[in-house]
Structures are given as structure tokens and as C-alpha cells.
Image (tube, helix red, strand yellow):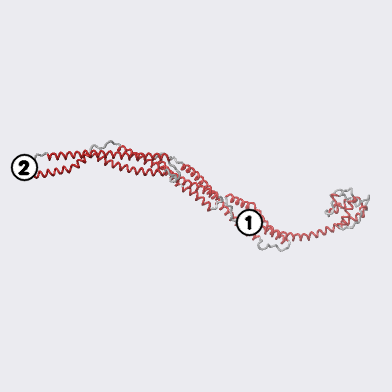
Amino acid sequence: CQMKTAGYHNVNVRNFTTSWRDGLAFNAIIHKHRPDLIQFEKLSKSNAMYNLNNAFTTAEDKLGLTKLLDPEDVFVEQPDEKSIITYVVTYYHYFSKMKQETVQGKRIGKVVGIAMDNDRMVQEYEGLTSDLLRWIEATISSLGDRQFANSLTGVQAQLAQFNNYRTVEKPPKFVEKGNLEVLLFTLQSKMRANNQKPYTPKEGKMISDINKAWERLEKAEHERELALREELIRQEKLEQLAARFNRKASMRETWLSENQRLVSQDNFGFDLAAVEAAAKKHEAIETDILAYEERVQAVVTVSQELEAENYHDIDRINARKDNVLRLWNYLLELLRARRMRLELSLQLQQNFQEMLYILDSMEELKMRLLSDDYGKHLMGVQDLLQKHSLVEADINVLGERVKAVVQQSQRFLDQETTEGFRPCDPAIIVERVQQLEDAYSELVKLAVERRARLEESRKLWQFYWDMADEENWIKEKEQIVSTTEIGHDLTTINLLLSKHKALENEIGSHEPQLMSVVAV
């Protein structure tokens, strides 16, 4: 009793009388063997009747021990020693028997426990094996997915996820695989030690099956890594290609915008030499711009490469490519329009130059028409008339040139013909055309007047010429009629008479000619 109650508060068994009167010793013995029946810490030494009643009732109700004592029998100055010993002995017999049953039960329980433990280990092995194989198959399927993110950052994230799988997710599974081998070995060893037939896993759940599945996992992992690395390289190349595209597009946009400003400026000058110089400069600009088409096409080529490789930001790439092409086409349109304006300006200046040439020619002819030389004799006048005919022919040629220049000038006054572009103030064109027409009209007038004067001069000198002829004719006839020869014979006389009559007839017939000369 002292051994069983040792360590219990306020319990000190020295005898079988007074040491038991407060009831704590009885409760301590029961609690020692069945702590589930007594809440010893709640008992108080001062409440002896409660303690005694609690112990006796518990022993009777829970342990089946006959209540040989009443609390009143014990809670006295000197309890009956024999009665207490008899009652305590019932405790001893009960707990001794319980101990023997416990030992036998432990032996049986040990065997059952081993069997149950082995069964638990089998269930654990099969469950862990199934879980591991399911994880392996699911992981192999996941690793076999080749639908990669269509961007460098996406593939980098997938590669980081793959590395996380290898460094975080996979190692515990590898440990599980090793633990399964240890678990199976331990289970089989325990079963052999317990004279049981060693457990053999079902087909598909053997360690060899796990190892084969693991090998397939390693292969899928290796292939996944290669595919990810390859896709990463592809995406890096695409990003480099996109960066190259952006650099090219930026340079093209800048160049095209600058040249648009350049060809939007006219500054052709205001004379033929300046416009011709501007035309040569435009030819150089046009050559440079047309040679740039290859560089514009290079931007298109890079965008097509990106589109063929399914670049993730292809919409932005195509939009920028379209913008470059729009700028290029707009530049070509500006170039065409500038060439049109330049050609119009050049044609206008050439037209003005032609006007100057015509005016210079007119001035030269005018000086000849204003000459006061109308001839000093008939041959001189006739020569001047021939020269004047040549001048008139030149004037007619100038007339055709004037007509052509005037018609050409009208083109620069028509907005539809010039697409709304005016290479010059229309008033200037009208003024120069009017100046040219006035000069031509004056020239024609001077030519008419000079011809009239030359004709008068020709008539005068023709009169002088004709009068001289008449005077010579008269003198010649006077010499004939003044001769004194009258003949010496009839024949001679008849011959002379015949000649004289002929002379008279000639003089008579010549009179109208003489009168016509005199009439002039």
C-alpha cells in the first residue's frame, strides 16, 4: 500500500487504522491502477466522509468490489484494523488479477498489433505507391505539354516554374520513392521475423514499376527542359528581331518625316536658271528617296518574319509597319506633287524665257523696220523689198511663236490643269502675255508701214527708171529723124520712106506707153 500510494499528496500509510480514516488512501490506490475513475486532485483531506464514500462507491460500481465498510465505520477515532485489512485485501486481489489479465492481453495484443501494424504498413505502402504513381503520370503529362507561353517573359516564367519543380516539388517525391523502398523492406523483414509470408506488391505497384515510371519521368523532364531551352532561345531571337524592327522603323519614320518636310518646301526661285537648278536638286532628292525603298522594304521583311514566327506583339509590329508604309506612300505622293509643281514652274519660266527671246527678236526686227533707208535706186529698193519680205516671214514665224506662248500661258491660269497650284501670280502672266501681244501688234503695224513706204519708193525709182528709158528712146528716135540722108536713087528713097513709115508707126504705138509713164 505504501508503494502504490507513494507520491500522493496528504497520503501517508503507516498502519491499517488511522492512516485510512480520511479516505484519501483508498482513493489513491484506485487512482493508481485506474486513474480514469478518480479525480484525485479535487479531493480534500478535510472532507473525509466524501472521500470515503467516493472510494467505496467507485469500487463497488466500477470495479465490482463489495462494499464491506461504510464511511461511518472508518471515520472514527480508532477504525477497526481487521475490517480495513479485509477490505484492502479485496483491492489487492482485484488489481493483481487485473495485472495478470493485462500481461496476457498485452501478449495477445502484441501479436495482433504486429499483424495490424503490418497491415497498416501494407495499406500505407499501397496508398503511397498509388499517390506517387499518380503524381508521376500527372507530372509526365504536364511535362509533355508543348503549349508554351508566346512571349519571352512567359517562357522565362515557365522555365522558373520548371526549375521550381525540379528543386522544390520533385525532391520530396524522390524522398518518397526512397522511403517506399525502405517501407517495403521493413515490412517484409518484419513479416519474416513474425513467421509470416512476406508481402509482395501487386503488379504495377512494385518497386521496379516505380523505378520504370521514374525513368519515364526523368526522360520527360529532360525533354521538357530541352524544349523550354529551345523555346527560350527562339523567344530571345524574336525579341532581338523585334528590337531590330523597332530600331529600323524608328529610323525610317524619322527619315521619312524629315524628307516629307523637305519635299513639302518649294523654293524654286523666280527665274529659269533658279528653277533649272531646283529641278536638278529635285532629281537628286528623288534619286535618294527612290533608292530608300529597299530600306523601307527591309522593315516589311522583318515584320513578316515576326508574323511568320507568331510573335506575341505582332499587332503592334504590323501597326508600326503600316505606319512606315503610310509615311512612305505619302512621301511618294508629295514627291510626285512637287515634281508636278516643279515641272509647271519650269515650263512657266521656259515660257517666260521664250517670251524674252521673242521680244528680243521683235526688238531686232523693229530696229530694221524703223530704218529710214528706202533705197537710192530701183535695184536698191527691190533689194530692200526682198529683205522686207524675209522680215515679214520672220514676223509670221514670230506670230506663230507668240500664239504658241499665249496658248501655253493659258495652261498656268487653269486651276484644273495645274491641280490648284499656281506657279506664279496670274496677274503677272496676264501682264506678260499682254506685253507680248502688244509688241507683236506694233511689229506687224511697223512692217505694214515699211512695206508701204518701200512700195512708194519702188514706184518712184521705177518712174525715174522708166523716164530715163523714154528719154533714151526719144533721143534715139530723134537721131534717126534728124538724119539728112534722103537717098540718091529711087530704090534707096523707097527704102528710106518705108523705114520712116515704120518709125512713125512705132512712135505712134509708143505714145500710150509714154503717157502711162508720165501718168505715174
Name the quadrant containing residue 352: top left
Residue 68 drawn at (x, y percent): 91, 56
Observer able to see residue 280: no
Q: Is residue 249 found left or right of 172 in the rendered image?
A: left
Q: Measuring 72% from the left and 63% from the top, which residue is drawn there?
A: 196
Q: Quadrant of residue 125?
A: bottom right
Indicate which label's residue lies in the foreground, 1 or 2: 2
Crowd class of label 1 (few under 14; some 14 to 19; many from 20; radius 10 Å): some
In this orientation, does residue 249 appear?
A: yes
Quick one: label 2, few (<14), some, or many (20+) residues within 10 Å?
few
Q: Secondary structure at mark 2?
A: loop
Identify residue type, mark 1. Answer: Thr
Q: Amino acid at mark 2?
A: His
Q: Quadrant of the C terminus?
A: top left
Label whose residue precedes the other's in the sequence (1 or 2): 1
Q: Quadrant of residue 185?
A: bottom right
Q: Residue 410: x, y in percent?
A: 40, 44
Circle 2 is placed at which residue position? Answer: 488
Relative depth, front residue between 368 and 376 = 376
